[in-house]
Image: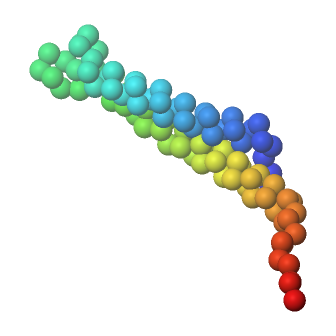
Amino acid sequence: MKLSRPVSWFLLAFGVWSWFIWITFVKNLWQDGSGLAFDDAGDPTAYFWVHLLLAVASFLLGTAIGVIGFRGVRALRREAAARTPEPPSSSSSAS
């Protein structure tokens, strides 16, 4: 399957965006002071575990999607390089 340049870049950007968003979310979840993520004893609540599971799943999906996009961009660059003719060599024989 061959991906177009815009689709490849979109998938790569989505992977990067996913990591940025979910890392921020996990940091905020870990530092939660509202009582949703941790109870009064400091133990994680069901809210914490569900949202941590969502974050891990999103990391994995974002990584997979980003890798697909990266591979598409890399393949397009290799294809473009293969189509570019090599310049003639400038070797002159002075005899």
Is 91 placed above or below 21 here? below
* Residue at point 40%, 24% (across, down): 25
Foreground: 77 or 14? 77
The residue furthest left is 41
Location of residue 55 (image quadrant): top left
Find residue 69 and report its image quarter: top right
**Residue 55, above or below 70:** above
Q: How is the image coloured?
A: rainbow
Between 16 and 48, which is closer to the camera in this rendering? 16
Tell me the quadrant of the picture where the C terminus can be found. Answer: bottom right
User: Going 27% across and 17% down the picture, which residue do you hit?
Assistant: 32
Q: Is residue 38 visible?
A: yes
Number of numbered labels in the structure image: 0
**Residue drawn at x 41%, y 31% as measured from the top left:** 23
Q: Which residue shows up at 75% across the image and 38% down it?
A: 7
The residue lying toward the viewer, choosing from 49 and 9, is 9
Tell me if 94 is positioned left or right of 20 in this view. Answer: right
Q: Position of residue 83 (x, y in %)?
A: 86, 60
Image location (x, y in percent) of residue 91: 83, 77
In the image: residue 37, left or right of residue 11: left
Residue at the top extreme? Answer: 34
x, y percent for residue 18: 53, 32
The image shows residue 85, relative to residue 59, as above or below, that is below
- Does residue 61 appear left or right of residue 12 in this picture? left
**At which x and y percent is residue 4?**
80, 43
